[in-house]
Amino acid sequence: MKRQFLRVFLLPSLVLVSACATILNTTKQKVELTSNPSGAEVFINGKSTNKTTPCSVWIDRKVKKGPYNSRNQYIYEFRKEGFVPYTYTDKADVSSKIYLNLFLNVAAIPAFGIDFISGGAYYYDNEVLAQLQKETGGYVVIRDTVVKQVYVTAPEVKGYMFERLSDVDVEIPDNNLEHPYRFALIIGNEDYSSKQVDLNKEVNVDFARNDASAFKEYAIKVLGVPESNITFLLDATTGQMNQSISKMNLLIKNAKGKAEVIVYYAGHGLPDEVTREPYLIPVDISGQNARDGIKLNDLYARLTEYPAKRVVVFLDACFSGGARNKALIAARGVKVKPTEALLQGNIATLAAASGEQTALPFKDKHHGFFTYYLLKKLKETKGNITFKELSSYMDEIVPLQSVLLNNKEQTPTLRIGINPTEDLENWVLKESN
């Protein structure tokens, strides 16, 4: 009788006590949100809180993956008129209280995992401070829609200035063209170590900020992209990249089939080790969590969701697990060959490397190897070159020079969407026709 009593009453008590993180933490957490200056509207995972800073919010410790956030991740965005939106990404950590739970679970094995199921095992930053910077930018009219364009110039990144140390950085030809329906998203992700405390500087992508800064000038002067139509990001976080991609998607939608979109990315790329799908890696995402990055196929899907005249993507990144100087996951000994999905519609991509190759740096030129020769050809031709001619040039010169200078193979990869309505291969880059 006593044994049965213990089973009925004592075991449930142990199960309850074992979930101590859930009891002590509860399933919600209070977060204080402030900004400098104050008065910024706060968005969490893409949704407005209808609050302005300073304020506090209660968040669930367990959160599902959404269109803006990964599982158990919060993306805070602070918006204030006249300032560049500030984004902060907070990924859940495991509470130290869970270790007490693990100890007690020796006596109450059925309760193992309660804290994770309830969310009590997770915790987030208690305070988030947004340092807002004044924006520079302009406005562009797309038919009857006025779209505000915001871009951040290179000096806004602390400690970085585009110094023009290569021959492709100076005397850039100026075609004095502006194509009002031409838009560009330019990203240079170089500094990963400052955003992640467990990384050293060796994992940074040498010269990625130079690559993006130089490409921006070529986009304006050679390709005729109005400066107000450029979204320019250096050392971009997950939230910033997602927001910029969403903006490109809306621009394409509102241009009613007239948009010409150019996307340039220099930085880390990684494959998912299970699915082998390629991802672009923001500076706040570690190599161990590639799925929290920007899936390349999702980027292509957003860029082709609505009809566009043409979408061209340049990628100075590889997706094998290698990098310009050191892999984002140093322990990964075997490179992975990423999978490639079919592209649909008026889209073409030109990537720095193929298969299991690495996108290499050109140290003497202070650029990525791929980007240097891309800019060199644009400078020589002043953009009076077809996309097919450009890709053929890259396919010819980059592999040869890579072996000569780096003793490694690097072969650019061209992909073009099926069933296009525009002749992308014969498009002359400086022209809009």
Image (spheres, rainbow, N blue to C red):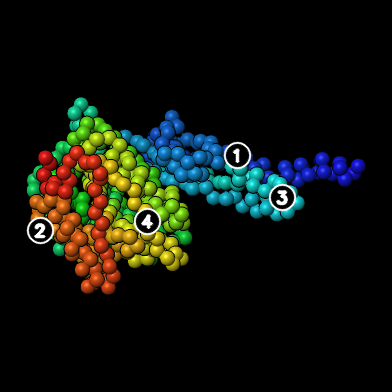
Where, quadrant-wise, is the N terminus in this rendering?
top right
Q: In the displayed structure, would residue 167 be above or below residue 65?
A: below
Of labels 2 and 1, earlier in sequence is: 1
Choose mark 1 or mark 3, whichever is in front.
3
In screen coordinates, is 423 left or right of 267?
left
In screen coordinates, is 250 left or right of 119?
left
Label 2 sits on residue: 380
Of labels 1 and 4, earlier in sequence is: 1
**In x, y percent, where is residue 221?**
13, 49
Q: Which mark is residue 338?
A: 4
Q: Amino acid at mark 2?
A: Glu
Q: Residue at x 25, y 51 (%)?
A: 415
Where, quadrant-wise, is the C terminus in this rendering?
top left
Q: Residue at x 16, y 59 (%)?
A: 393
Query: Badge 2 local density, few (<14 within 10 Å), some, or many (20+)?
Result: few
Q: Are marks 2 and 1 in contact (CB under 8 Å)?
A: no
Q: Residue at x 41, y 40 (%)?
A: 68
Label 3 sits on residue: 109
Q: Which quarter of the picture shows residue 392?
A: bottom left
Say which element carries label 2: helix
Q: Are marks 1 and 4 in contact (CB under 8 Å)?
A: no
Q: How far apart, in angstroms, are the residues tagged by discs 2 and 3?
A: 70 Å
Choose mark 1 or mark 4, whichever is in front.
4
**Farthest residue, direction right:** 1
Q: Amino acid at mark 1?
A: Thr
Q: Which quarter of the picture shows residue 66?
A: top left
Label 1 sits on residue: 27
Q: Which mark is residue 213?
A: none
**In x, y percent, where is residue 87?**
39, 43
